[in-house]
């Protein structure tokens, strides 16, 4: 696909599709915002709810990305029967509902209602991504489809950057939990409580009647701080629902006869698509793990506060955004599969250094991984759907289903952190460093996929 794109003189977005392209591209920023305000919430919820473990706090990501897995294929069948616009409207409605469910969740002050709200919210994101990605691909000449999707995806990190800023400056900065528990830890340490018994000692301390009121006040305050951005977001998304409702979009086609079984059979015979789904699963797993656990890495290995650690996350997103535009430009002259392979190799090198260094230099390498990741999602997506025609709608669902990687790997990462440390003989790794063995394996898989598709394209006649 990238070779044809490089040789074609077709515009990336033609004039007839300019308005629907701009309107649909706004959705990429909208789901980018909620993705990256949510990643730091793993650390925030763990700080506020003393009764949950790191593994349990990662239920935030399990619910968030599990919603994609649940709804991706139903979303594809829905838009295949109806239209792109119908898929967008239903997606926005579910998105808004899930965000507004933070109101009753905050009222209960029960952690497990928050993952449930995010689960419903991502039903909407599954509809939006399953709809918007193939819609963007269809808006013009097939030879420029991957470049067009990369351009649209470049606006996703703009929303992500705003979400990170809100998380850092309006949420993490205003949480009282870390100072609250730091004071308790200092008091218990002075009483001779050892570090390995501190967690249980804190729970016992908070169970005492004299301390319950202070803990309850802190929890209520911090839950409100977490709740408010989601409620505001739910109202903003409701406004977008009405904008799309009253705007005329192309491709409002009559219902089609659906043959999902036959389509699925064709897809699973397509090695390019199957490889793309596998690579996408590992990519999303790597991205979410890297961005979610920057805070924990910087806290444990560098002694940074949550807010300062989140500032490094913001730098990572700026690098990601800048690299996305650079890579979109390079794809005009360079094969997409080859570029994907080279950046995956770069990800392998930087992740290895992140694991081994365990200091500010390691944190800088962790941030630098974002430059390598910037190209991956839309490029894997475009390569996997190349030449699928109408099967691209169900094929797209498989690639959105692959977002389930973001639900599974953070759970494993939480387990690593709960173990404390790993003595390998020649080096002792903190749990927060060992976590990144998981993204390292992902970049190996992506490099293999990129190289295989590059060799496959080279064998084809121009």
Image: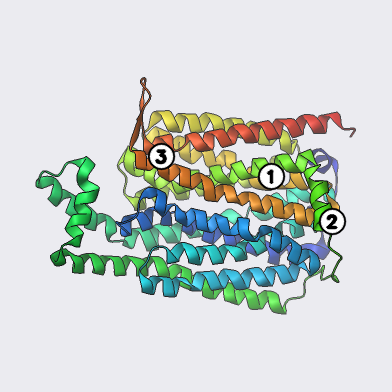
Q: Quadrant of residue 178?
A: bottom left
Image coordinates of residue 158 in percent, x first then y, are 56, 56
- Does 268 appear above or below 40? above
Is 342 left or right of 273, judged from the image as shown?
A: left
In contact (CB < 8 Å): disc 2 and disc 3? no
Residue at image mark 3: 416
- Mark nearer the N terminus (2 vs 3): 2
Between the residue at mark 2 and the residue at mark 3, the CA separation in whole angstroms equals 43 Å
Farthest top residue? Answer: 426
Q: Residue furthest right?
A: 461
Q: Give the secondary structure at mark 3.
A: helix
Give 40 or 47, whichever is nearer the viewer.
Answer: 47
Which image quarter: residue 356?
A: top left
Q: Nearer the viewer, residue 11 or 57?
A: 57
Q: 186 left or right of 307?
A: left
Q: Is residue 318 visible?
A: no
Residue at screen point 76% across, 37% down: 333
CA gap, disc 2 to disc 1? Answer: 18 Å
Residue 452 % position (x, y)? 74, 31
Rendered image: mark on residue 277 = 1
Quarter of the image that includes the N terminus: top right
Q: Which mark is residue 390?
A: 2
Residues packed near mark 3 inside 10 Å, few (<14), some (14 to 19) or many (20 plus)? many
Pinpoint residue 296: horizontal percent, then vertical percent.
Answer: 38, 45
Give the quadrant of residue 78: bottom right
Residue drawn at point x = 21 percent, y = 46 percent: 198
The residue mark sitting in front, 2 or 3, is: 3
Q: Quadrant of the C terminus?
A: top right
Instruction: Give percent across and percent down for residue 306.
Output: 34, 51
Give SS at disc 2.
Answer: helix
Tell me which numbered mark, 2 or 1, is placed earlier along the sequence. 1
Element type where label 1 sits in the image: helix
């Amino acid at each position: 696909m990238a070779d044809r794109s490089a040789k074609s003189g077709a515009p990336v977005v033609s004039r007839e599709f300019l308005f629907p392209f701009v309107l649909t591209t706004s959705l990429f920023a909208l789901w980018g915002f909620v993705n990256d305000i949510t990643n730091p919430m793993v650390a925030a919820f763990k700080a506020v709810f003393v009764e949950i473990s790191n593994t349990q706090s990662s239920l935030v990501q399990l619910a968030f990305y599990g919603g994609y897995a649940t709804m991706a294929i139903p979303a594809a069948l829905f838009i295949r029967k109806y239209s792109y616009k119908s898929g967008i409207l239903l997606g926005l409605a579910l998105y808004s509902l899930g965000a507004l469910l933070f109101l009753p969740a905050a009222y209960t002050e029960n952690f497990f209602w928050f993952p449930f709200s995010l689960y419903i919210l991502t039903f909407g994101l599954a509809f939006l991504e399953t709809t918007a990605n193939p819609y963007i691909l269809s808006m013009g000449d097939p030879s420029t489809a991957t470049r067009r999707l990369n351009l649209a995806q470049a606006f996703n990190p703009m929303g992500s950057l705003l979400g990170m800023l809100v998380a850092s400056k309006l949420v993490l900065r205003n949480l009282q939990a870390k100072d609250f528990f730091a004071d308790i830890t200092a008091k218990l340490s002075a009483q001779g409580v050892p570090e390995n018994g501190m967690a249980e000692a804190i729970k016992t301390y908070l169970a005492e009647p004299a301390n319950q009121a202070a803990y309850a006040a802190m929890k209520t305050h911090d839950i409100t701080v977490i709740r408010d951005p989601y409620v505001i977001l739910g109202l903003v998304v409701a406004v977008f629902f009405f904008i799309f409702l009253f705007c005329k979009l192309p491709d409002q086609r009559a219902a089609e006869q659906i043959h999902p079984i036959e389509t699925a059979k064709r897809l699973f015979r397509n090695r390019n698509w199957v490889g793309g789904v596998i690579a996408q699963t590992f990519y999303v797993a790597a991205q979410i793990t890297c961005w979610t656990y920057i805070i924990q890495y910087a806290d444990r290995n560098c002694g940074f506060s949550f807010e300062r650690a989140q500032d490094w996350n913001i730098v990572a997103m700026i690098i990601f955004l800048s690299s996305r535009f650079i890579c979109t430009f390079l794809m005009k002259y360079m094969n997409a599969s080859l570029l994907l392979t080279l950046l995956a190799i770069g990800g392998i090198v930087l992740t290895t250094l992140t694991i081994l260094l365990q200091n500010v230099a390691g944190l800088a390498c962790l941030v630098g991984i974002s430059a390598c990741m910037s190209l991956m999602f839309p490029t894997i997506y475009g390569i996997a759907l190349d030449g699928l025609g109408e099967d691209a709608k169900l094929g797209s669902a498989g690639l959105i289903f692959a977002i389930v990687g973001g639900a599974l790997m953070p759970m494993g990462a939480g387990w690593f952190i709960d173990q404390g440390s790993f003595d390998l003989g020649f080096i002792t790794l903190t749990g927060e460093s060992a976590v990144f063995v998981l993204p390292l394996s992902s970049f190996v898989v992506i490099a293999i996929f990129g190289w295989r598709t590059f060799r496959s394209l080279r064998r084809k006649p121009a």
